[in-house]
Image (cartoon, rainbow, N blue to C red):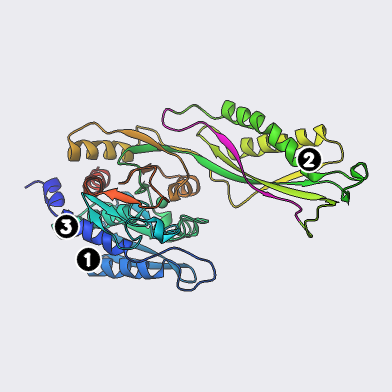
């Protein structure tokens, strides 16, 4: 029996499904200030599972109750180091009465597994775990190091991956497969996101005498009118992508006044608007900053007396792109062909992932590929197709073999 068959023999549908159900049944919604609401229980489960399988395990406490679990198999040579990446946090289930399958029951009906995290992304994580374990169980050793990372806080500030990038096992990585739900399409591009907080300053005055003040709310109005120009500017800088929607600029949060009490007869001196800016590859951080800066100056010149300043909320998450010729991409393409017997389908990631940070901080190539419909995450009745889940586990194993053995 050849090596690929030995590996695929160790990936059994019943076990992959059971592991995914175990993970879904451990709620891991993070709620700030609630010591019970975090990733710690599911991380402890993942840690114990890898220890039983004979992996090296490193638990990295990123924040109280929020541990990354990093597991790896020793390499027999000095080959590259490949990460299969997943996150353990899930978003809120919302109102459980809106679900037709309870959010943490992990019901299996008609080839689908239901629950919060079923697609985003306990299925991808389970597939990665089983794929890695298949090497040890089948007695297949690798010249490079195969690493599985179950990281915290992907749905928030991505603390887990930022932490991983500062550790020896993180710094030694050569490439990563991001196991996020992309309906088993090979994604070489990810959209970037910048959250820009714009603050408008005017001058407070009585509502009966608007001529005595400068109304910051009118400054917000001017910003809104200028947004199509910003969007056009960004679309000119970013390259067109076959797999990604073009850049968008969306106002999402509005606050006025910024300080003090809102009163009907007081013109607010300060107002604030947050923009969700989505980007495609081809733009860098300086170009983004300049485009938003220009918007601020245009608003100021359109409205005398107004001051507009902006700052990004958190780090810029730049769009990413990886070339088709990368050994990781070639390994993935070959793996999909081996497992499915068909040419791969390509896609693009509409948002940012932990892969964004691995790509921009470590500079390593990433491919996003995982089970679950791309539109399903964060909805009620989230589900994953079991067929896709098993296929992903098989593809991860074969891709890891091809990439790490060359
Ligand atoms: Zn996710």
Q: Nearer the viewer, residue 389 or 85?
A: 389
* Disc 2 CB within 8 Å of nearest ligand 1 atom: no
Crowding at label 1, few (<14), some or many (≥20) Cα neighbours within 10 Å?
some
Sooner in the amino-acid sequence: mark 1 or mark 2: 1
Residue sitting at the far bottom: 35
Outermost residue toward the left? 1
Question: From which residue to which does the magenta span run?
Answer: 242-258
Answer with mark 3 or mark 1, whichever residue precedes in sequence. Answer: 3
Mark seen at residue 14: 3
* Residue 74 appears in the picture as rendered: no
Q: Which mark is residue 53?
A: 1
Q: Quadrant of residue 183?
A: top left
Within 10 Å of disc 2 (Cα), the crowding (few <14, some 14-19, many 20+) is some
Residue under the point 23% across and 69% down:
52
Residue 344 in the magenta stretch? The answer is no
Give coordinates of residue 246: x percent, y percent. 51, 31
Quadrant of the image occupied by residue 38: bottom left
Q: Are marks 3 and 2 in contact (CB under 8 Å)?
A: no
Q: What is the number of the mark on residue 218?
A: 2
Q: Position of residue 355 (x, y in %)?
A: 43, 47
């Amino acid at each position: 029996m050849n090596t690929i068959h030995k590996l695929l023999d160790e990936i059994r549908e019943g076990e992959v499904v059971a592991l995914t159900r175990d993970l879904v049944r451990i709620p891991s919604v993070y709620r700030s200030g609630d010591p019970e609401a975090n990733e710690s229980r599911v991380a402890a489960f993942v840690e114990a599972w890898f220890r039983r399988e004979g992996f090296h395990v490193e638990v990295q406490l990123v924040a109280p109750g929020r541990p990354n679990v990093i597991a790896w198999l020793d390499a027999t040579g000095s080959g590259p180091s490949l990460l299969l990446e997943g996150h353990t946090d899930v978003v809120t289930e919302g109102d459980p009465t809106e679900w037709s399958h309870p959010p943490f029951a992990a019901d299996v009906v008609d080839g689908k597994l239901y629950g919060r995290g079923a697609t985003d992304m306990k299925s991808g994580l389970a597939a990665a775990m089983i794929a890695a374990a298949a090497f040890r169980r089948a007695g297949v050793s690798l010249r490079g190091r195969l690493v599985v990372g179950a990281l915290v806080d992907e749905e928030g500030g991505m603390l887990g991956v930022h932490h991983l990038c500062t550790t020896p096992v993180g710094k030694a990585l050569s490439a990563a497969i991001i196991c996020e739900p992309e309906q088993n399409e090979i994604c070489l591009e990810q959209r970037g996101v910048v959250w820009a907080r714009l603050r408008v300053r005017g001058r407070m005055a009585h509502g009966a005498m608007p001529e005595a003040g400068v109304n910051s709310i009118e400054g917000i109005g001017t910003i809104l009118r200028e947004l199509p120009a910003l969007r056009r500017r960004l679309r000119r800088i970013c390259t067109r992508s076959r797999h990604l929607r073009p850049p968008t600029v969306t106002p999402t949060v509005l606050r006025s006044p910024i300080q003090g009490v809102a009163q009907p007869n007081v013109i607010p001196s300060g107002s604030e608007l947050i923009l969700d800016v989505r980007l495609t590859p081809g733009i860098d951080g300086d170009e983004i900053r300049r485009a938003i800066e220009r918007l601020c100056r245009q608003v100021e010149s359109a409205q005398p007396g107004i001051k507009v300043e902006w700052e990004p909320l958190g780090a810029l998450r730049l769009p990413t792109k990886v070339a088709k010729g990368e050994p990781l991409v070639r390994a993935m393409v070959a793996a999909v062909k081996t497992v499915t017997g068909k040419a791969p389908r390509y896609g693009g990631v509409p948002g940012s992932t932990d892969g964004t940070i691995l790509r921009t901080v470590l500079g390593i190539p990433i491919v996003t590929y995982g089970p679950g419909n791309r539109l399903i995450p964060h909805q009620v009745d989230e589900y994953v197709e079991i067929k896709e889940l098993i296929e992903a586990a098989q593809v991860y194993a074969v891709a890891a073999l091809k990439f790490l053995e060359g």
